[in-house]
Image: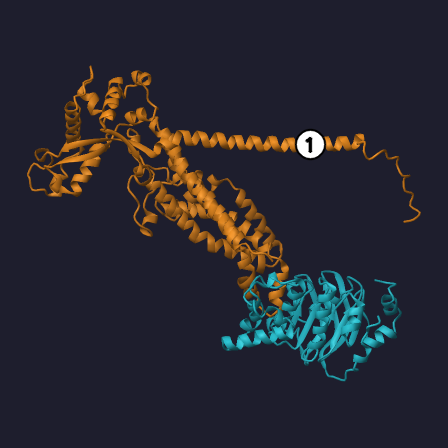
Amino acid sequence: MEDMRLADRTASARENKITARGVQVYYGTNHAIKDVDVDIADRTVTAFIGPSGCGKSTFLRCLNRMNDTIPICRVEGRIEIDGEDIYDKRVDPVQLRARVGMVFQKPNPFPKSIYDNVAYGPRIHGLTRNRAELDEVVEKSLRRAALWNEVKDRLTSPGTGLSGGQQQRLCIARAVATSPEVLLMDEPCSALDPIATAQVEELIDELRENFSVVIVTHSMQQAARVSQRTAFFHLGNLVEFGETGQIFTNPRDPRTEAYITGRIG
Amino acid sequence: MTDASLPTTPHRGSLIEVDARTRRRNAAEKRFRLYGLVALGIGLAALVILLTSVLSNGVSAFRQTSLVLEMNLDAAVLDKKGNRDPEEMKKVTTIGYGKLIDKALKEAVAAKGIAIEGLTDKDVANMISKEAAAQVRERVLSNPDLVGETVTVKVLANGRIDGYLKGRVTMQSAERDSNVTPNQLRLADALMAEGLLVKAFNWDFITGPDASELRPEASGLGVAILGSAYMMIIVLILSLPIGVAASIYLEEFAPKNRWTDLIEVNISNLAAVPSIVFGILGLAIFINFAGLPQSAPIVGGLVLTLMTLPRIIIPTRAALGAVPPSIREAALGVGASKMQTIFHHVLPLAMPGILTGMIIGLAQALGETAPLLLIGMVAFVRDFPAAPPEGFFDPAAALPVQVYNWTQRADPGFAERASGAIIVLLVFLLVMNAVAILLRNRFERRW
C-alpha cells in the first residue's frame, strides 16, 4: 500500500456524469444487485472493488446495457447519463454504447489488422468522412492508448499477433476511437503481467483527462493507485462509496475494513 | 476439516517395485490400446478391400475396344436418289449402315488373309457392336458429303469381344456362351495382331448417354453426371441461403422458449429421418400435388434440399456457436448492432465451419440414391437434358441411381460399368471433401 498516490486525489468537485438510483438487477430469480445508488463524476477514475461474485461487473455492464444480451437478466431502477435515462424505451443501446465504451477482462481484439481493429468503431458509426480522417483517428487513438510507437510500422498485421499487454492497449484504443464519454473497464489487467499492468494503469490515469473512467478490479492496490473514488460492493450491496483515500485509510463500514485488511473476500 | 478422521497412511513399498494394483492398471491400459488398434485395423482392411474390389472391377470401364475399318459409304445404299439431302437420307435406317459395316469388316478380314476354320459370316458380323451402325449413321447424316467416299471409321466392338480383351471372357466361357463363339475370339486375336482391333481410353463412358440392355459397350455416364450436377446446383442454390439464414436466426436471434426448443429437437430428428421418406414426400408433394415432371433434376434437387437442410443447419449452428463470446462482446462494446456483429465478425469466423458442413452435406446429397428411386430418376434416359434452367425440368439420370441401374442388368459387361461409375462417384466425393479440407485450412483463423 506504499505507493498509494494519495497526493493525486483532488477531491473532485466535478459534476456527475452518471447517476444511478435504486438499481436492482435480477438473473432469473437471483437478486444480483440490491438497490445501488452511485454517482460517477466526469473526468474521474471510479473503481469498483469487492470479492468475487459481489456484482461489481454486473453493475458495470448495466452502465452500457451489455446485460441486455443476457436473456434472463432484468434491470430495474434509474441510470442516467447527463440526465437522460439509459433504460428509457426510446434509447437504442447501440447508440448508447458508442458513448459508453468498454474494455473487457480478457484482451479480445478482432482477428483483423491492427488498423481495422481501431477503425471499426469510427467506420460503423460514420464518424469520419474519408480515409485521411480515419487514418488520423486511428493514429490518435493508438497514441492515446500508448501503443502507436510500437505498432506504427505494422498497422496491417493482425491484432491477435500482439502480446497480451499490447492487445489490451489495442482494445483500449479501439474503445477510445469512437470518442466515448465514459470508458468502462472490467478487470482490464487481470490477464496481464506486472509490466503490462503498470503500462495500462498509467494509461488509465492519462485517460482521465478526457473521459470518465469506471474500472472494476480485484486488486485493491490497483484501485488505490488509479482511482479517485472507490465503491465497495459486497453480496450485491453497495457497502461504501467515497473518496479512494478515505475508503482505504478510514473506512466507515466494518465490512469494508474487513475486506481491505483481507479478512473477507 | 482438521477433526475429520483421515485413514492412516497406508504402507507403501519401494518405488522400484511395481505393486499389483499398478500392474493391473497398466495391463488394462495395454488391453485398451490393443482394442483400438484392432478396431482401426478392421476399418482399414474393410476400406482396402472395398477400394481394391471397386478398382479391379471398374478401372477397365475406362478403356474400350473398337474396330478400325476402311469403309466404303456406298451411295447406292445410303442415298438412292443421289441428291445428298439429309432429310431423304434419314430414310435409311441403321440396318442399311449395319450391312455396309459388316461388308467392310468381311473385306478387311479377307484382305489381311485371315482364315479361321468354321468362321461363319454371322460370326464376323457379330463382332461389331449393335451401336456401331448408329455411330456411322450419325456421322454420315451430319456430313452428307462423305457418301460415296471410302473413310476410316472407328466403331465399337461387341461387348463380349471387349470382355475378351479385358480378360472377362475366355475361350472356355465362350464355348458355353450363346452370345460369343471361340472362333470369334480367334478372329479377335488375329484382328488385334493386324492392328484393326484396338483398345483406347473410353471418353464415351464419361460423356456418353446410357445404352440399352444388349449393348453395355456403348453405355456412358454423361446424362447421369449432368443430372447429378443439375441437382447439386439446385441443392446449393436453395440450401445454402436457407440453411445459413435459418441457422443464424436460430442461433443468434430466436428467443429461447418452448417453440424454439421444439424446432431444435425436430431439426435433429429430421437429420435422422431415412432418406427414402424424403423421396415419398417429394413424390407426394412435388410430383402429385405440384405437378412437376417425373425424373427431372428439379424434383430431385428439391427432395435432396429437404434432406440436406437439417444436415447443414446443425454444423452451421455449431460453427456459429463456436465463435467465442468475447468477439461478440467486443463488437457490441464498440457499439455495433446485432446484425453488424454477426455479419462483420461472427459469420466470417464461422465461415470455415459453415463451408465444411455445406460441402459434406452436398457430398451426402450427391451419393443419395433412395429418394431418387421414388421420384423416377431410375428411368432409362438417353437424351441429354437441355442447358439450365430449362434442363432442370428435362428427364435425367443421377450417378448413384445409374450405379443401381447397371447392377440390375443381366449382361456381365454392366458389372464393369457399375464399378466404373462408382469410381467416378468416389472421385467426385473425394474432390468435394478435399475442397472442404482446403477451405477449412485456408480460412481458419486463430483468435
- Colouring rule applied to residues: by chain
Chain bearing tag 1 is: B
Give the left or right position of residue B5, taking residue A48 as reference: right
| Residue type highlighted by circle 1 | Lys
Using the image as rendered, state which of residue B266 and residue A147 is in the foreground: A147
Give the left or right position of residue A124, taking residue A173 as reference: left
Using the image as rendered, state which of residue A99 and residue B185 is in the foreground: B185
Q: Quadrant of residue A257?
A: bottom right
Q: Which chain is orange?
A: B
Find residue B256 and report its horizontal and vertical position in percent: 62, 57
Find residue B362 and report its horizontal and vertical position in percent: 46, 46
| B317 to B415, vertically: above or below | below
Report which residue position mark 1 lands on.
Answer: B30
Residue B294 visible in the displayed image: no
Find residue A122 and report its horizontal and vertical position in percent: 56, 73
Q: Which chain is cyan?
A: A
